[in-house]
Image (cartoon, helix red, strand yellow):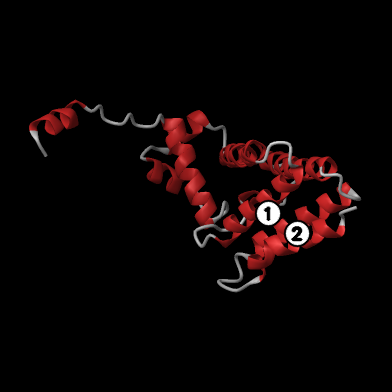
Amino acid sequence: MNTQQSALAVEAPAAKPLPPRERILAAASDLFYRHGIRAVGVDAIAEDAGTNKMTIYRHFESKDELVAEYLRGLARRASKIWDVLAEKYPNDPRAQLHGWLETMSAHAGDPEMRGCALANAAVELPERNHPARKVIEEGKCFVHDNLSRLCRAAGLRDPELLADELFVLIEGTQVCAQSFTANGPIFDLVRMGETMIAAHSR
């Protein structure tokens, strides 16, 4: 490293640490997704976030509220895929549907992923009054609504039925992804989805 590089390295500001609330959410998100919501306690989250339980409860009324916020953040990030597809394939809903299938296939086939966090949470949280249940329902409805919109815009026959079929396909694929390590049904996701779409073409 020369003198100029050394000076620049010294002058470079250190990365600002995340505020406590963001650290807690980041730690909880990783632990909940990798190990499951029920298996992770507040103590483990506090340790991973480098804080304490008192600080967690200062920012989140309860673990249930922390779970709801974790899922809310995931749903917000996942929703951006529709904007990305619209920008990549402007005024081409059929191409956007194909792009969605490819994106979901890549997600399901990623060995680092454990399926859909919202679906996993729905299995773990059967209580209808749990604050996360509304987040899960809204997130799933948002996906279905976007599929319906694209199917209608593409002029496909029975667009609502096709949206149902595509939605159930991806939900099943996310579950299968956790059971098959290789050469499972998940690797035919795009082909199966395109077959469904072709069957609804006018």
Q: Which residue is mark 1?
A: 101
Q: Is residue 202 above or below residue 84?
A: below
**Residue 35: % across, % down:** 51, 57
Residue 126 seen: yes
Secondary structure, mark 1, is helix
Q: Residue at x 11, y 39 (%)?
A: 1
Q: Residue at x 45, y 44 (%)?
A: 27
- Quick one: which residue is furthest to the left in this view? 3
Q: Which residue is mark 2?
A: 194
**Residue 142: % across, % down:** 74, 40
User: Are circles 1 and 2 on residues that touch, CB within 8 Å?
Assistant: yes
**Residue 26: % across, % down:** 46, 41
How would you rate the neighbour count of disc 2 (Cα within 10 Å): few for under 14, some for 14-19, many for 20 or more?
A: some
Give the alpha-carbon distance from disc 1 to disc 2, as whole Å. 8 Å
Which numbered dot is residue 109?
none
Q: Residue at x 61, y 42 (%)?
A: 78
Q: Quadrant of residue 132?
A: top right
Residue type of the residue flagged with mark 1: Leu
